[in-house]
Amino acid sequence: MLDLKYVMANKQEVIEAVKNRGGELDLNRLSDLDERRRSLISQTESKKAERNKVSDSIPEMMKEGKDVSLIKTKMRMIADEIKEIDDILKDVEIEIRDIMLNIPNVPLSDVPIGADDTENIEVRKYGVLPSFDFLPKAHWDLGRDLGILDPENAAKISGARFNIYKGLGARLERSLINFFMDTHAQSGYTEVLPPYIVSRKTMTGTGQLPKFEFDAFKLSDNESFLIPTAEVPVTNMLADEIVMEQDLPQRYCAYSACFRAEAGSAGRDTRGLIRQHQFNKVELVHFTTPENYQEELDRLTNQAESLLQKLNLPYRVVCLCTGDLGFSSCKTYDIEVYMPSYGRYVEISSCSCFGDYQARRMNLRYKKDVKDKPKYLYTFNGSGLAVGRAVAAVMENYQQKDGSIIVPDVLKPYMGVDIIK
């Protein structure tokens, strides 16, 4: 959530930022509400000052034997007026918050302006694209032929966009999860295994609600949700807390299953493991002070990249333009792994800086000294990595002419085999 004072002082800048994201924003109602809020605060403070003045005079009047019944009646009237004003103020502040929760983050000044993903800027590439002396198969065909993926039975059990991993397919998924978590833990991350069900407040804290409620799996109580990513519970671990600066930065890694009711547009991505209603992911979450945001975002991105380098998978990093930026993010690098059957790179991680946007929603602050006024810290998160997409990338890039799949060297200790056939 943005700072209300900032929005009111920079209305045109915020409107332009939303426009660059492909949206529209009318701040007239918010301006009226803010003016009304300030007026009500002034009124209630004036009434409280009057009440205090009258209250202070009562002991002296009683000491002098004067009748204070009229004074007490006046105090009750003032108290009723204060309550009435405070009730109106509360309603105004609720409406202001509702509006503010639906305003996206303002992109940083170095984020490229563009309409959609075609205008993202490539930052760097890694690896050599695979060369085959045969027509490479898509991972769903490889999985079917090897008997390690079973979308048909998954559809029978759960519906479209689910998959069953079998045999060495299940072991490959599990091996990647363990490899990712081991790598992050050895790099200084604190390992977390979070709940998969969170509250409405928790989803709101990281920006999934209220805007994306229809994209989430909601439970019958209407107040609980299956997590779309481990970012949600892990980031909220520090909600409503004040962290001492000497305890920053804090970095966490977490494996979780993820659940998304909206799994992307129709087309090629509906097949295979790229867009699923349920998938596994390892998430990285960072907390730090504002001064170190670019260094921390680079560190996060490099950590996710290191996994693809160890797997020897070709990939590229792109800086997202304003029109492709996530709702809560102020700057994002996407890591895209090369998929031979697609003939292009496919997103496998989004590494984002949120500034203090999430921290304001979660009331997450820090201070350097116990006597200091607390400030909002910066939050970051990125996939390290999306496991199903990593499985698909390994299958396609390491496939052989006979339909078998070579196991990457770093996964052999986890898999216990050198080849899937």
Image (tube, helix red, strand yellow):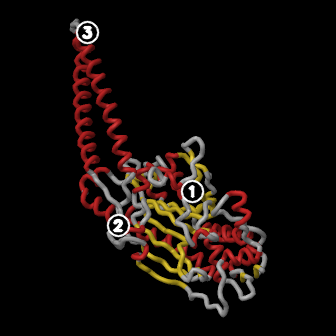
For residue 297, side relative to residue 41 (left or right): right
Q: Which secondary structure lies at badge 3?
A: helix
Q: Are marks 2 and 1 in contact (CB under 8 Å)?
A: no
The numbered disc on residue 69 is: 3
Kind of residue indicated by mark 3:
Ser
- Report the residue marked by disc 1: 261
C-alpha gap between disc 3 and disc 1 = 64 Å
The 10 Å Cα crowd at callout 2, few under 14, some 14 to 19, many 20 or more, is some
Q: Residue at x 23, y 32 (%)?
A: 43
Q: Which secondary structure lies at badge 2?
A: loop
**For residue 85, above or below residue 213:** above
The 10 Å Cα crowd at callout 3, few under 14, some 14 to 19, many 20 or more, is few
**For residue 270, above or below residue 133:** above
Kind of residue indicated by mark 2:
Leu
C-alpha gap between disc 2 and disc 3 = 61 Å
Image coords of residue 131 (percent x, y): 61, 91
Q: First in sequence, mark 2 or 3: give its number.
A: 3
C-alpha gap between disc 2 and disc 1 = 30 Å
Q: Are marks 3 and 1 in contact (CB under 8 Å)?
A: no
Q: Residue at x 72, y 66 (%)?
A: 152
Kind of residue indicated by mark 1:
Ala
